[in-house]
Amino acid sequence: MTQETGSPDTPVYGFVGLGVMGQPMALNLARAGTPLIVWNRTPDRAEPLRAAGARVAASVEDVFAHARVVFVMLLDEAVTDTVLGRGGPAFGKLVAGRVVVSMGSTAPEYARGLAADVHAAGGRFVEAPVSGSRKPAEAGELVAMLGGDRDTVEEVRPLLAPMCREAIPCGGAGSGLLMKLAVNLYLNTTIAALAEAVHFADRQDLDLETFRAVVDSGQLASGVTRVKVPMLAAHDFTVQAATADAHASTRLIADAARAAGIATPLLDLSSDLYAESVRLGNARLDMSSVITAIEARTEARTDTATDRP
């Protein structure tokens, strides 16, 4: 296959993976006038990109054939390896001479291994996991945490502007993902604590709109509270960040912590709650569904108390 990158004055950029986060991110690139070629395993997800002026590729090979820099936003490590053909001869042909920008959330050691394989094949690699959920993705308000060699990071950094409010270099390969895990530890435990607070207020017969007003008037107010408190109060679990993904994130953090001998007591409790919410059937609903796990624990306590003689 002959690889093309367009003229020097009009480089083409690729985007692979148009899921809950990837689609609005790619749309922001296209709407900003970025010459873009996209691909997704489910073709229907690419139609809004076509309408926004992006070219829709027939295959991932077609993306890499035309783009010098390819953003990859796939579900997990296994899907990323499968889509890129990692471990087989197709991988080297795909990434040689290309910059692979991995924007998904993976284990830091996975990113280091992928970076080494890309470099060995003659390509370059930057990790750029993002902090934020669907609404910040739609608004172009994500925060990217970049890891990789300095020159390539600085080359990629301005390309992220349509998607990200900030793009912050964090060090070599693996550093961006370690930073993402640290941020997610804070986020995952915060959402679980916020859900518990809403549940407490509700069971104490407090008005939840007043609770929201108090929280949003105080020092704990944030974009998270402004979005999640109304969702929690209404049991509106329209997905911004899926419960199963939140649980997977807690396991990634726990694995990294155990490898470094770090205790994570709050994370471990939160992880149990997200796992319970997944078992309740909320895997692809928003992570705020963690409140249902807390409610189930309350009901179990109530049933136990009722059964006592």
Image (cartoon, rainbow, N blue to C red):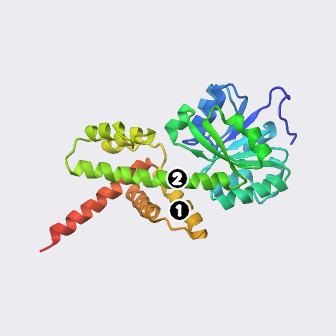
Quadrant in which residue 20 is drawn: top right
Compared across the picture, whether 63 is left or right of 163 comes to: right
Please give the name of the residue rendered at 44% of the width and 50% of the height, measured from the top-left corner: 287
- How many numbered discs? 2
Q: Secondary structure at mark 2?
A: helix
Residue 3 x/y as whole percent: 85, 39
Q: CA distance from mark 1 to mark 2?
A: 11 Å
Residue 307 x/y as whole percent: 16, 70
Q: Tell me which numbered mark, 1 or 2, is placed earlier along the sequence.
A: 2
Residue tagged 2: 184
Please give the name of the residue rendered at 19% of the width and 47% of the height, measured from the top-left corner: 205
Q: Does 277 appear above or below 142?
A: below
Look at the image and tell me in which quarter the C terminus lies. Answer: bottom left
Please give the name of the residue rendered at 77% of the width and 39% of the height, measured from the top-left corner: 155
Look at the image and tell me in which quarter the N terminus lies. Answer: top right
User: For the residue marked with disc 2, what is the amino acid?
Assistant: Asn
User: For the residue marked with disc 1, what is the amino acid?
Assistant: Arg
Q: Residue furthest front?
A: 219
Question: Which label sits on residue 138?
Answer: none
Q: Residue furthest left?
A: 309
Q: Residues within 10 Å of mark 1 (few under 14, many from 20)?
A: some
Residue tagged 1: 251
Q: Secondary structure at mark 1?
A: helix
Whether residue 215 is visible, yes or no, is: yes
Q: Nearer the viewer, mark 1 or mark 2?
A: 2
